[in-house]
Image (tube, rainbow, N blue to C red):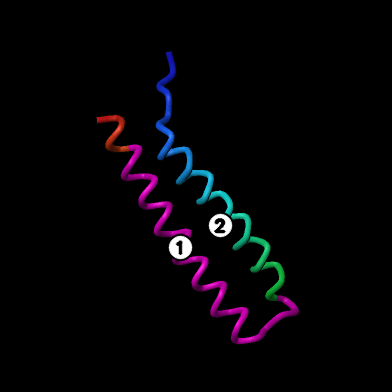
Amino acid sequence: MAKKKSKKVKSVEKEYLWYKKKVDEMEAERSYDRTWGGKELLVKFKKIKLYLKTQLQKMKDTLEA
């Protein structure tokens, strides 16, 4: 029987997937939008995405233990 994910894990996973999709879109746009503002936003989103990824991994490890 598969384990159920908690609502908190699901919400963090949903947010992480949103940022992942957004970062992918922004990286594709970088070929023609080379402004500093665009780069600043891209780096900010990448940091948020990385934070959410580590947070998600910690939550999953906690649930498995």
Near mark 1 (Cα within 10 A), the count class, few <14, some 14-19 or many ≥20, is some
Name which quarter of the figure residue 57 lies in: top left
Report whether 28 appears left or right of 23.
right
Looking at the picture, does residue 32 appear above or below residue 20? below
Most common secondary structure along the magenta stretch: helix
Looking at the picture, does residue 25 appear above or below residue 3? below
Residue 6 on image: x %, y %: 40, 32
Q: Residue furthest right?
A: 32
- Assign the C terminus to one quadrant of the image: top left
Distance from label 1 to label 2 (Cα)?
A: 8 Å
Q: Earlier in the sequence, mark 1 or mark 2?
A: 2
Per the image, the residue denoted by label 1 is: 48
Q: Amino acid at mark 2?
A: Tyr
Q: Secondary structure at mark 2?
A: helix
- Assign the N terminus to one quadrant of the image: top left
Q: Amino acid at mark 1?
A: Ile
Q: Is residue 58 magenta?
A: yes
Residue 25 on image: x %, y %: 68, 63
Residue 38 on image: x %, y %: 62, 79
Q: Which mark is residue 19?
A: 2
Q: Which mark is residue 9?
A: none
The stretch in magenta equals 31-60
